[in-house]
């Protein structure tokens, strides 16, 4: 079976996997991200970021790593993302859906300090309201974890300040057919496909401006 204009599926996946193992996708996304921030007159290294998760359904091939998100009533996996205020991912971590958000946050942020040297503040929703996590963030990277609360008396659905950036990024990912569900056997492949989707988005933005 051939992918139109690309060749055999096995050949395409071989090169995709090889680039993943070499870290090429990660390096390419970081380079494009820095270029986009500089184009907008920002420091290439962000000082603030937003953390959140997206729960997505799995299929039969991907049920080896799968769980149930009781809060969102989704059987599948969670995409843990740390994003800058442009909505571009700084770190990506995919787990089974029953992993608690605070535990996933530790996995997402562990060892990240070197790659985000200017990061000071991490914004999060109420699911991350845990003093142990806030203390861990301070020790791990010197980061201040700020939980964005609802305004007193506010009811129903509402987007909190800066939180709309998160929803926009998840919307971008959902527009990619390969990411509408998690079809992958390995979570590492799922993480890389998110990187590829964001690379594609950034390249499209650059093309429109040239």
Image (cartoon, rainbow, N blue to C red):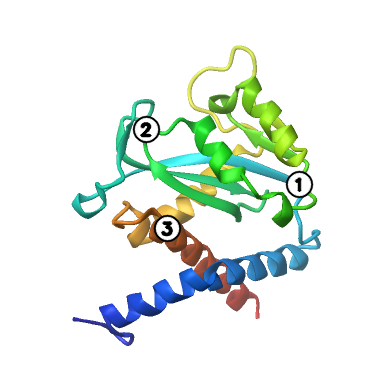
Element marked by disc 3: helix
**From the image, which quarter does the N terminus lie in?**
bottom left
Residue 158 occupies which quadrant of the picture? top right
Q: Which residue is mark 2?
A: 98
Residue 129 occupies which quadrant of the picture? top right
Q: CA distance from mark 1 to mark 3?
A: 25 Å
Q: Which residue is mark 3?
A: 188
Q: Residue 63 in the image: x percent, y percent?
A: 24, 47
Q: Residue 76 in the image: x percent, y percent?
A: 31, 41
Q: Is residue 68 above or below residue 110?
A: above
At horizontal 31% and vertical 82% (from top left) the residue drawn is: 11
Q: Is residue 117 above or below residue 100?
A: below
Crowd tier of the residue under label 1, counting other residues whose Cα lies within 10 Å: few below 14, some 14–19, many 20 or above: many
Label disc, if present, on residue 92 of the rendered structure: none
Q: Residue 107 in the image: x percent, y percent?
A: 54, 42
Q: Which residue is mark 1?
A: 119
Q: Earlier in the sequence, mark 2 or mark 3?
A: 2
Mark 1 and mark 2 residues within 8 Å of each other at the beta carbon:
no
**From the image, which quarter does the C terminus lie in?**
bottom right
Q: Residue 138 in the image: x percent, y percent?
A: 74, 33
Element marked by disc 1: loop
| Count of all numbered marks drawn on residues in the image | 3
Residue 147 visible in the current orientation = no
């Amino acid at each position: 079976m051939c992918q139109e204009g690309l060749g055999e599926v096995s050949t395409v996946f071989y090169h995709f996997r090889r680039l993943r193992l070499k870290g090429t996708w990660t390096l390419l996304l970081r380079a494009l991200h820095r270029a986009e921030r500089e184009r907008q007159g920002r420091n290439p290294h962000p000082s603030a970021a937003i953390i959140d998760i997206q729960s997505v359904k799995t299929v039969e091939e991907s049920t080896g790593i799968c769980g149930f998100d009781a809060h969102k009533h989704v059987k599948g996996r969670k995409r843990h993302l740390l994003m800058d205020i442009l909505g571009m991912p700084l770190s990506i971590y995919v787990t089974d859906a029953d992993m608690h958000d605070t535990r996933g946050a530790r996995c997402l942020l562990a060892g990240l300090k070197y790659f985000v040297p200017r990061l000071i503040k991490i914004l999060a929703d109420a699911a991350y309201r845990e003093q142990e996590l806030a203390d861990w963030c301070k020790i791990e990277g010197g980061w201040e974890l700020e939980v964005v609360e609802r305004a007193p008396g506010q009811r129903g659905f509402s987007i909190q300040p800066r939180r709309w950036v998160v929803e926009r990024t998840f919307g971008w990912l959902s527009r990619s057919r390969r990411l509408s569900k998690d079809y992958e056997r390995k979570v590492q492949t799922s993480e890389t496909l998110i990187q590829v989707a964001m690379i594609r988005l950034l390249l499209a933005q650059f093309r429109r401006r040239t």
